[in-house]
Amino acid sequence: MTDNNTIIKMDMGTMQSNTHAAGKPVLCLGIESSCDETSAAIVDSNRNVLAHIVYSQIPEHQKYGGVVPELAARAHILAIDTVVKQTLDAAGKNIDDIDVIAATAGPGLIGGVLVGWMAATGIAQSTGKPLVAVNHLEGHALVPRLSATAANGTGKGASVDFPYLLMLASGGHCQILLVRGVGKYELIGQTIDDSAGEAFDKVSKMLGLGYPGGPIVDKRAQMGNPKRFHFPRPLCDKPNCDFSFSGIKTAARIMLDKNTEQVNDEFINDFCASFQSAVVDCIINRLNHAMDTEIVKQVKPKTLVVAGGVAKNSAIRAAMEKLATTKNMIFAAPPMNLCTDNGAMIAWAGIENWRIGNIVQEPIAPRPRWPLTEL
Ligand code: KG4
Ligand code: ZN
């Protein structure tokens, strides 16, 4: 999710050349529509984002306190043609200039996924261009290879090489994965109930702060005392790498019910800071466990990566960067606008899949559920 409707045109500089037959970089048009953003981007194989349009539906869902799937699907239908056309115009390209078409084919809200997927299929069929069915989670997982802020002296925009250890935290997912390559994911741990993003959104709703909750709670937490309230750290004593956030959410509900008279700005800031600090502790504890697993010790990933909407969180980024430093790893996170859902990550995953020949050969059915480990 983005904070508002934005039009972003960027040039990330040339980093690595992967060219097709004519020696020119490959241009991919990527379409994302799996939740409440209708987004398209044109990205090339040299890691340039030529144009990127994100139409956010947040204003349409805000009054319901969350995404309403039917409204989202309808809004995608109304926006998709304009968003694709604006993206081509912003890049100064027409459809004949594009080499590859990519779109999210799942997982996500199926009505929205269908809109973007059918648009991409229509373009690919009418132009004869190759079509890539992108797994939305793979879009998040690979986008740090398009653009990432890396610490440990490697500077900004360093490309992220395989294998890497990934904390994927979004509104729908919370997983630790070992990323060995395109389509090669090993699940190290995941939530057994809510996702981290859901926990942020629900706590924000309880406090009457609005939707989406993550950015608001993050902002309020920066002004608060993280030690004032005690939130549980579920599963942190367990030897595996799984998460649980529903207990933190319940603790929040009970604490709020007990203190209704005290709720003022300072209370809310301290509450957000204390809640966020519990989430950060869980993430760091679980990542520490992940680094101690046999598989991770054997593969020895050099980079620790955070991706997904929750990767925008300032405290999570800072804590993960610190963890990476103590473990002698590089830390990498996508720039803010590539953390929440966006078309650029789909276009980049389109290029990465196209490179290994992973293009659609016959009609496929988009999937509401599509774990990365099934790629
Ligand atoms: O990846 P994303 O855009 O959508 C899904 O694929 O689910 O992630 C959206 C989630 C929302 O739950 C939102 O509250 C959360 O990312 N989020 C944040 C922050 N910004 C967005 N969570 C914590 N801190 C933030 N700054
Ligand atoms: Zn997402």
Image: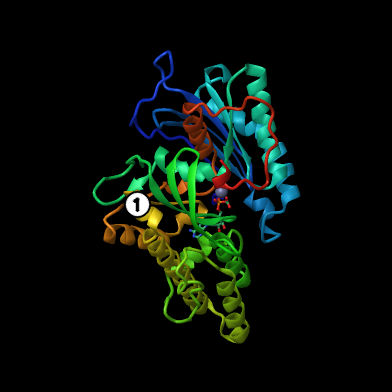
State the residue in front, 225 or 373: 373
Callout count: 1
Residue at image location 68% in from the left, 54% down from the top: 67
The percent coordinates of residue 12 (x first, y second) are 38, 35
Q: Position of residue 147 (x, y in %)?
A: 39, 40
Residue at screen point 41% across, 38% down: 146
User: Residue farthest to the top?
Assistant: 22
Residue underneath mark 1: 298
Vertical position of residue 341 compared to residue 79: above or below: below
Q: Position of residue 360 (x, y in %)?
A: 61, 27
User: Between residues 345 and 181, which one lies in front from this camera angle?
Assistant: 181
Q: Position of residue 234 (x, y in %)?
A: 51, 73
Colour scheme in use: rainbow
- Residue type beneath disc 1: Gln
In this picture, residue 148 sits left or right of residue 153: right
In the rendered view, does 201 fall on the left or right side of 61?
A: left
